Amino acid sequence: MIIGNAELIHNTIQNCRKCSYVDKPPCKYKIYHKYLPKQLHTLVISESPPPGRKNDYIYNLNHSDRLRNTLAKAFRVKQDKVIETLIKYNIFWTTAIKCRPWSKRDLEYMRRNCISILQHEIELLKPKKIIALGRTAWKSINELNITSIKIQRYYHPLYVIRFKRSELFILKNIILDIEL
């Protein structure tokens, strides 16, 4: 069932033409086929792939990534073990904006265009819990009016590492669902 849903989400993103974009990292790296846990528990939603002509992306394991590096610090694992750690805990990381924006100025427009894809993704994946990290993810989740799934909101990991470094352990506990 989850394999068919992975294909549906991938195709929905691949076929979307609402925005001008650099690329479509979820499709480029086949994240729904390679990294979706068999027993999904938690769907983590952050902002978007990094804007501009870049290679960094949480699932591009051949390139260093600030988000994956921050999560490595929070989880206390090596950067190349972050995705493995997420899968181990039945967590899938997605973004409110599916395509790589040209610049930060495009984020809100693209977020609004992606809201139906995010809703479709949530309906197909049926997570037990959603963690929305950062304002962009919060806005999207608020617009979806989800009532049947536990939702938790927290700061984006890159905000935590820059301005609230002492809260990295809180970020870890929230994402990995560890009781404080």
Image (cartoon, rainbow, N blue to C red):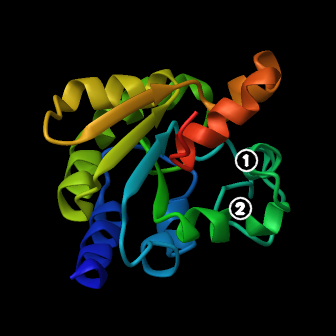
Residue 91 at x, y percent in the picture: 48, 59
Amino acid type at image mark 2? Val
Determine which residue is flagged by label 2. 82
Write the residue at 24% across / 73% down: 8
Locate residue 161: give its quadrant: top right
- SS of the residue at dot 1? helix
Write the residue at 36% across / 73% down: 39
Residue 66 at x, y percent in the picture: 79, 45
Front residue of this view, candidates 66 and 132? 132
User: From the viewer's perspective, is 148 left or right of 132?
Assistant: left
Disc number placed over residue 140 in the picture, else none: none
Q: Residues within 10 Å of mark 2 (few under 14, many from 20)?
A: many
Spatial separation of the CA atoms under disc 2 and disc 1:
7 Å
Residue 7 at x, y percent in the picture: 30, 78
Determine which residue is flagged by label 1. 71
Residue 92 vertical position relative to residue 53 in the rendered view, above or below: below
Residue 101 is at least partly visible in this image: no
Amino acid type at image mark 1? Leu
Residue 2 at x, y percent in the picture: 27, 78
